[in-house]
Amino acid sequence: MTVVNLPAVPRVLIAEADPWSRDMLKEVLLNVRCDARLDLCADGQQALELLAANPYDLVIVDWELPGVDGLNVLRSVRQRKRNPPLPFILMSSRSDSASVREALPLAPAAYLTKPLNMESLTHRLQDLLLAAGEEVSCEVPTLAPGMTLSVYLERRRELAEGAPLMTDVQLAVKRSLNPDGLDLTALEDEIRIDPQVTAVLIAAANSAAHHNGAAVQTVSQALHRLGTGQSMNLILGLALKRSARLSDPYLSDYAERYWDLSLHTAEYARTLARLLDLDQARCYCAGMLHCLGDLALLRCLQEWKQAGGELDEQEAVGEALAQFGAAYGSALRTRWRLPLELRELIAAVYQLGGGVYSREALVMNMAAQMARLTEHDGIEELAKSRTARLLKIGLPELMRMRKK
């Protein structure tokens, strides 16, 4: 391993084609050195251009980059004969001895096989970026002078990290481990109730790096396409992000209400789908994701407070949710490229457009109406609704569902 005296603030290049893996690497690195200056890229040619233009203290590159591959990036770095050599972590899905022998003469600081072991990666980064016993702390960024809440939320809409975690993902992964490794079925039971984990896994499974067939629309499909190692890395990586959990009690109460609404909608949707012989898992996921924007907004409100912003809680939070909640959800679902079919089911939770409706869209609309009923609302009116008539669901079925 190469040991160098790093500057007070290291500059690091991460070159990884898959956006979700790239983001996970960023979070692991920032968890070790929150002050690091990061440059991110998705192909080998851009990596070479950045290396030619900037002095780096550490480079993390995937061998399987498009264009110029990671091994040739490493070869180019070593041809410059920097002294001491630039620390270079090479990642690869190739674990065969021939590939390792090909890379070793170029003296990478580490050769890590995919899916990555996050604990091993963290230790490598600590060795390369921290002196023995050193810890780095970073202050939360402050707001720009004159920044208003409305402008802040508008700017954050296209950059929001998504919803806060509503489950303990580290405990979920631990419970799903057994002597034979990670049990994907057990893991699904643990994490399918979390909107953020659901959205990220589905989005990652549909990224270019994994898109090799029909669009993934359920947690089970996502876990099996990603595999055990990548699924575990992505889930644990979510816990490293800033504001991954809501610490503000008032905002946490709001989030619990939206989460409860998501859970009830998802459960009603699954029950209706089972009754009508439709895709239960897809309807469940759509119900779980329909409050993603509201939850993401609450996370941004916490970041606003942490950065020194004031929040007149009851009035400001309610107004922000009404103004930005739907827009945040739409922006996230589009930016994360969730499948159109799944997005259409989520939209049906709120309203049914004109034209012909799929039975699953009708199920989502009915499930949402049931989830929003209070104990004083008459379910009889719901049984007379147009949605119930189109689904041919009567009062007896609705009453049985309500009692469960």
Image (cartoon, grey):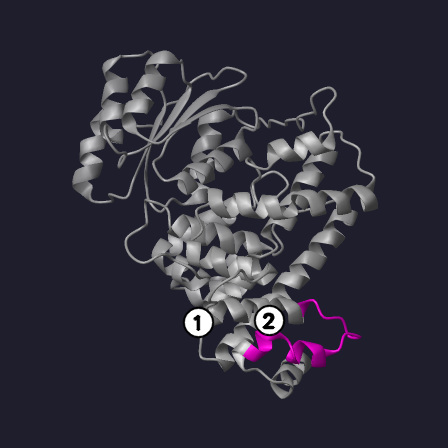
Q: Position of residue 165 (x, y in %)?
A: 60, 51
Q: Are marks 1 and 2 in contact (CB under 8 Å)?
A: no
Q: Nearer the viewer, mark 1 or mark 2?
A: 2
> How dense is the environment of label 2, judged by Cα within 10 Å: few (below 14), some, or many (20 and up)?
many
Q: What secondary structure is marked by label 1?
A: loop
Foreground residue, 390 or 370? 390
Q: Is residue 329 magenta?
A: no
Please name the amino acid that badge 1 sits on: Asp
Above/below status of 326 relative to 303? below
Q: What secondary structure is marked by label 2?
A: helix
Foreground residue, 221 or 136? 221
Stretch of the chain drawn in magenta = 371-389
Name the quadrant containing residue 222: bottom left
Residue underneath mark 2? 366
Q: Quadrant of the N terminus?
A: top left
Q: Is residue 381 magenta?
A: yes
Which tag, 1 or 2, sits closer to the chain's start? 1
Name the quadrant containing residue 108: top left
> How dense is the environment of label 1, judged by Cα within 10 Å: few (below 14), some, or many (20 and up)?
some
Identify which residue is drawn at 47% across, 72% down: 359
Q: Position of residue 261 (x, y in %)?
A: 66, 62
Residue underneath mark 1? 279
Q: Position of residue 3 (x, y in %)?
A: 40, 22
Name the quadrant containing residue 106: top left
